[in-house]
Amino acid sequence: MADLEAFRAEARAWLEANCPTEMRRPLQAGESFVFGGRSEKFETPGSELWLERMVAKGWTAPTWPTEYGGAGLAPAEARALAQEMRALRCRTPLSSFGITMLAPVILEFGSEEQKRRFLPPTARGEIRWCQGYSEPGSGSDLASLQCAAVRDGDEYVVNGQKIWTSDAHFSDWIFCLVRTNKSGPKHDGISFLLIDMDQPGVKATPIVLISGASDFCQTFFDNVRVPVANRIGAENTGWTIAKRLLQHEREMLSEGGGSYQERKKRSLSEWARERLGAGPGALPDAEIRDRIARVEIDQLAFNASLRRSTESAKAGRGPGPETSMFKLVVSELSKRRADVRVRLAGVQGLGWEGEGFDENDLEATRIWLASRAESIAGGTSEIQKNIIAKRVLGLPD
Amino acid sequence: MSSPLTLSEEQELLRETARELVQAKSPLKEMRRLRDARDADGFSRALWKEAAELGWAGIPFAEEHGGAGLGYAELGIVLEELGRTLAPTPMLSSVVLAGSAVQLAGSAAQRGELLRGICDGSRILAFAHQEAPRFAPYRIAMRAQQTASGWRLDGEKIFVLDGHVADTLVVVARVSGGSNDREGLALFLVPATQKGVGIARTTLIDGRNAAQLVLSGVEIGGDAALGAPGTAAAVLDAVLDRGAAALAAEMMGGIQEAFERTLAYLKARDQFGVKIGSFQALKHRAADWFCELELTRGIVLEALRALDAGAKDAPRLVAAAKARASDTFILSGEEGIQLHGGIGMTDEEDIGLFLKRARAAEQTLGDAGYHRERFARLGGY
């Protein structure tokens, strides 16, 4: 405990000395996080410096072993570091699916050679990863996927299509579920491949969503050759790895408290007071007030439950089926919050772009639309309920 | 750092002891027996004596008063176990509500006299507060007038939990101000046998005790006041917070039990040649219910710990906890019956008892709407 407090003090002092000022304020309009990889532009010098310094400490992946680019921190130390970063409002130096989703399964299922090859550049932000899971015909029924990898000597030849690949058009590599066996049960013919996107036959096309944004792509593979050495785990055992990765994804989504957040941090009640033109005291709209109270109470309950789960999880134990509950709850909660926020704007929340609308309202409306994806992406709410029913409650098939 | 939401070793041990005693001495059928026999006390004195001997009635009180010097986190553990079997005890009425009033507002002499009796179970006190059907904490018309020798009380109370078995009533009265004013309130100790005190037991859907109380020109001495008359609102708020948090913990036990019983039924009941728990429509209801239950457990534990820590936001967390506990318990009663189908409508099947207790507990000390309103107000909106 004393050691932990010493670590915390040290970490805090280091962060205070090394985190550039512009990395210690919330994202401003038009700014984005650092995602790394070939397409990274580093919007400010501070963002590049901050990444460099954190990489040197091993703190972009604090719990990984040092030989793979991490800092070898104990879980409690990593939590303390995260708490100190929050307290000082330090931005995450690197927003990376590679770190949050892929690396845990490489650490668990990958070979020593694969760990040494992929983890250090991922920790350094040199590879931006995207996730090749869903296909046009395989949404909730993910295991029915058809994107095929046919063995040809030391290589696979990959043909097929993925969809909802977040930021594929900016990514360097894709971790991809492919079918390596068409006969037998669908779960038993899947393999987990890492594919370099910078090669002939790989094409990523953005999809315009109801929010107007194009964060998701369709990704096409046309006779793409992938070394067998890029397969994680044995051939046809990819489904086990895929499910574990989904648990890490759900855990990440739960901890993020909803993916879509307004840049201007204001509580719903503050927005309500302003948009209703209300003075101090109880808000004059009882229905809106009750909606806000419901959202805030459920948020507190969610936070408490998440904290309880974190405390009870034994150090080093991977995420369990309860992550389904948190993913389900947080996505529905995030949708409700976005919904209330738009209601508060009234007809001013109907603006799409241009003059005549407050930029905060415009943003809130886009967030409301974008956040509809939260109960679909990463496994729909209905799929999460299936998982809870089966894995947590033990209800029969 | 906030205190952990998981149980310590000592707390686990307390939970095991509580579960064993409650399951052995006060299983659900004991609650049925008390109800069906129209038991004069409405609770088991034998169980209460044993509980007091184990120190449960003294959990939140200081050792100098015969208590265990523990907190609401520990009291919540015991209440949850009592809630699982719907066991009626004077825990909420005597220990939490009346006991807190004495603890917070009483003089050294009053605390010395009363708390030891509450802790060892030899005395039962009741908290006579509510006057209107819908919970409104400051809606107090009970009048207290100063006399040459003390005070004279006139007025009526409803829903006085365990009022007919209490030896002493802690009465919330008004010395000044209008009917809904927060100012002008006072607390008085009134012996149940005092001249002018009329107590009538009522029969409730959940089989528990609540009395109607009429005070007609009841004369009490100046030393019967708990704290300075006219300034009781702060103590009243604190007493009601503790009551709501403790009740939410008890409700958590009922929620958990109703859920587990229904889950077992889904795994056992055959229709269309399969277990009904294999139907997705029912799986999703069970999953939704489970999420509500887990969220409510989180906020209830958080509220109990905030009370123990004397945290500034404790009242707001208590409001959140009671709001969620009320909604989740009602949901649990409703879903419990619906998922049991026709058998759930019978008195013989236990699940219906949970809906009845849910309705009573929801209304006790303010329902979900009341507490959400309070949550918003305490949050400055």
Image (cartoon, rainbow, N blue to C red):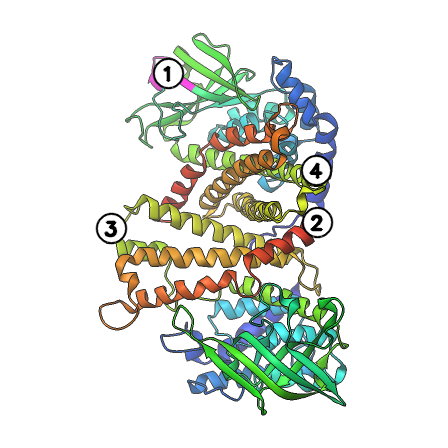
Q: Position of residue A107 (x, y in %)?
A: 71, 75
Mark closest to the chain's N terminus, 4 or 1:
1
Q: Position of residue A203 (x, y in %)?
A: 53, 85
Is disc 1 in the same subunit as disc 2?
Answer: no
Q: Which residue is tagged 4?
A: B269
Q: Check disc 1: other Cα within 10 Å, few if <14, some if 14-19, many if 20+.
A: some
Which one is in front in this view, the residue at disc 1 or the one at disc 3?
A: 3
* Mark 1 residue element: strand
* Mark 4 residue element: loop
- Label 3 near label 4: C-beta < 8 Å? no
Q: Which residue is tagged 3?
A: A279
Instruction: Say left or right for A212 vs A359.
Output: right
Name the kind of residue labelled 1 in the image: Gly
Q: Which residue is tagged 1?
A: B155
Is disc 4 in the same subunit as disc 1?
Answer: yes
The residue lying toward the viewer, choosing from A384 and A116, is A384
Name the kind of residue labelled 4 in the image: Arg
Q: Quadrant of the N terminus of chain B?
A: bottom right
Q: Residue at x 62, y 71 (%)?
A: A7
Which one is in front in this view, the residue at disc 4 or the one at disc 3?
A: 4
Q: Check disc 4: other Cα within 10 Å, few if <14, some if 14-19, many if 20+.
A: few
